Image (cartoon, grey):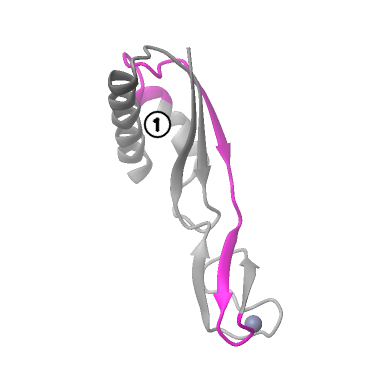
Amino acid sequence: MHEMSLCQELARLIAERAAADGFSRVRRVVLDIGALSHVMPEAMVFGFDVATRGGPAEGALLEIRRPPGTAWCTDCAASRAIAARGDACPVCGGHKLLVTGGDDLRLKELEVV
Ligand SMILES: [Zn+2]
């Protein structure tokens, strides 16, 4: 379950930032989990609780947003929204798509006390 290691990485990142910026508690964490990423939001919620125990983000509210997948269709020469990797272009039906967004996990916001 790679979500657990992602959460440990996230907890480490938050602790580092707490030390660098001089805050001790985090109230809210906003994560973007792209619709095309291979990360399960439910597993992140669970892993986050475990990984942040004893650190500055313990008990923080984890807010997960799901930005949609986007890809560049080389046939249309335009950006298209896609629901899954390997989907055809919703406009021309072509398969020459390059994923351009919604495929990763990002720490977007930290609300600190
Ligand atoms: Zn197209």
Q: Residue at x 41, y 13 (%)?
A: 25
Furthest toward the right, the residue is 91
Magenta-highlighted residues:
49-77
Above or below, 66 relative to 27: below
Count up the numbered dots: 1
Q: Residue at x 44, y 53 (%)?
A: 104
Is residue 72 left or right of 103 when viewed as pictured?
right
Mark 1: is the Cβ under 8 angstroms from ligand 1? Answer: no
The quarter of the rendered structure image containing the N terminus is: top left
Q: Residue at x 40, y 19 (%)?
A: 57
Q: Is residue 103 visible?
A: yes
Quarter where residue 46 is shown: top left
Above or below, 70 relative to 93: above
Quickly name the residue at label 1: 47
Q: Where's residue 86, x and y in %? A: 52, 74
Q: Where's residue 17, x and y in %? A: 33, 26
Above or below, 105 relative to 82: above
Is residue 105 left or right of 82 when viewed as pictured?
left
Q: Is residue 57 magenta?
A: yes
Q: Where's residue 63, x and y in %? A: 56, 31
Ligand 1 appears in which quadrant?
Answer: bottom right
Q: Is residue 1 visible?
A: no
Q: Residue at x 30, y 39 (%)?
A: 5
Furthest toward the front, the residue is 21
Q: Where's residue 79, x and y in %? A: 62, 72
Q: Nearer the viewer, residue 42 or 14?
A: 14
| Amino acid type assigned to the residue bearing label 1 in the image | Gly
Sort mark 1 into few (<14), some (14-19) or many (20+) by Cα contacts within 10 Å.
many
Is residue 84 left or right of 20 when viewed as pictured?
right
Q: Is residue 66 magenta?
A: yes
